[in-house]
């Protein structure tokens, strides 16, 4: 039987503070965000959200909750532990009557068998105790309900991980405002290289993803780079680590998809 949330060691590192700065600053909703969301949750489609009670676990400024509501979810609960992110989500989702926003830690999520579909995009890999959050998400699902998690992958990101591990001990000690400024030094050459198609000349892995990123405005590319440089914790999962993380719960079915050659989409159905 899997350990309960309360069995995890304390104290828990609060990884939300730095991301609160990000989501308070980046509140714009770009048209391509919907395409991104569908790519992260594939092979799920909009019809899978219709008529469902949905949880957005780690909602940031709430952009993904908007798509779930748009696709006809009966209800959407968006939760985040970063207070600034919750404020941004409440402001950005105020026009949607079927969406509620709450400040909660995934470690202490208080719902039990309340949702047909839970998704957590880009959150679990930033947690000190990811297994604790997965246990809570499993508990929150009704029997037959599905959990969709998008994670950073190690396979396909080897060069970036080596670069990140050299810089990370310094970056995590810097205030978010300074990391935000330093991110321009990285994002400017990346933006230029993508526009010139350098990733195609070099035949870099994940070229389909890089082709998509090349269409993004500079402000969004800078946000992506900033998001990569910002966190206290960022774990890049190997496939066997993904399997081990989700094997701790009693799932009826688990499917793991290598998403665009650089990340993982995990879809689990509660027994």
Image (cartoon, rainbow, N blue to C red):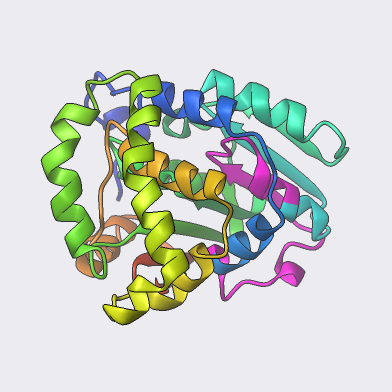
Identify the residue shown where x is 58% and y is 61%.
Answer: 36
Position of 265 relative to 140 (above/below): below
Q: How many marks?
A: 0
Return the residue nearer the eye: 59 or 208: 208
Can residue 127 be seen here? The reply is: yes
Q: Which residue occupies 26% across, 21% down?
A: 174
Q: In the picture provided, is 101 more to the left or to the right than 18? A: right
Q: Quadrant of residue 18?
A: top left
Q: Nearer the viewer, residue 170 or 127?
A: 170
Residue 182: percent from the left, percent from the top? 32, 32
- Residue at image location 64% in from the left, 65% down from the top: 35
Whether residue 56 appears in magenta in the rendering, the answer is yes
Drawn side of residue 149 relative to residue 124, left or right: right
In percent of width and height, residue 173 lies at 22, 21
The vertical placement of 266 against 33, above or below, is below
Q: Quadrant of residue 155?
A: bottom left
Q: Residue 100 lies in magenta, yes or no?
A: no
Q: Which residues are magenta?
A: 40-66
Residue 252 makes an appearance in the image: no
Q: Is residue 142 above or below residue 173?
A: below
Q: In this orientation, which residue lies closer to the viewer: 93 or 218?
A: 218
Is 107 displayed left or right of 33 in the figure?
left
Q: Is residue 16 left or right of residue 244?
A: right
Q: Position of residue 21 (x, y in %)?
A: 48, 23
Residue at x 19% of width, y 36% of height: 168
Where residue 2 sits: x, y (%)? Answer: 30, 48
């Amino acid at each position: 039987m899997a350990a309960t949330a309360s069995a995890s060691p304390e104290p828990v590192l609060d990884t939300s503070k730095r991301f609160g700065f990000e989501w308070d600053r980046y509140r714009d909703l770009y048209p391509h965000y919907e395409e991104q969301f569908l790519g992260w949750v594939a092979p799920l489609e909009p019809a899978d959200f219709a008529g469902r009670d949905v949880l957005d676990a780690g909602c940031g400024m709430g952009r993904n909750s908007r798509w779930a509501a748009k696709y006809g979810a009966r209800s959407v609960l968006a939760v985040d532990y970063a207070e600034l992110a919750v404020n941004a989500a409440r402001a950005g989702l105020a026009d949607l009557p079927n969406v509620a926003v709450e400040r909660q830690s995934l470690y202490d999520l208080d719902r039990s068998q309340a949702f047909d579909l839970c998704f957590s995009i880009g959150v679990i890999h930033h947690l000190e105790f990811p297994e604790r959050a997965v246990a809570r998400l499993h508990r929150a699902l009704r029997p037959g309900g599905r959990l969709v998690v998008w994670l950073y992958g190690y396979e396909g990101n080897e060069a970036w991980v080596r670069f990140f591990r050299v810089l990370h001990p310094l970056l995590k000690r810097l205030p978010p405002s300074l990391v935000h400024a330093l991110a321009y030094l990285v994002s400017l050459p990346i933006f230029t290289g993508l526009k010139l198609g350098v990733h195609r000349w070099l035949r870099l892995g994940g070229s389909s993803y890089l082709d998509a990123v090349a269409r993004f405005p500079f402000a969004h590319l800078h946000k992506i780079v900033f998001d990569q440089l910002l966190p206290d914790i960022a774990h890049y999962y190997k496939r066997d680590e993904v399997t081990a993380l989700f094997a701790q719960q009693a799932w009826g079915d688990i499917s793991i998809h290598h998403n665009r050659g650089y990340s993982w989409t995990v879809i689990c159905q509660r027994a």
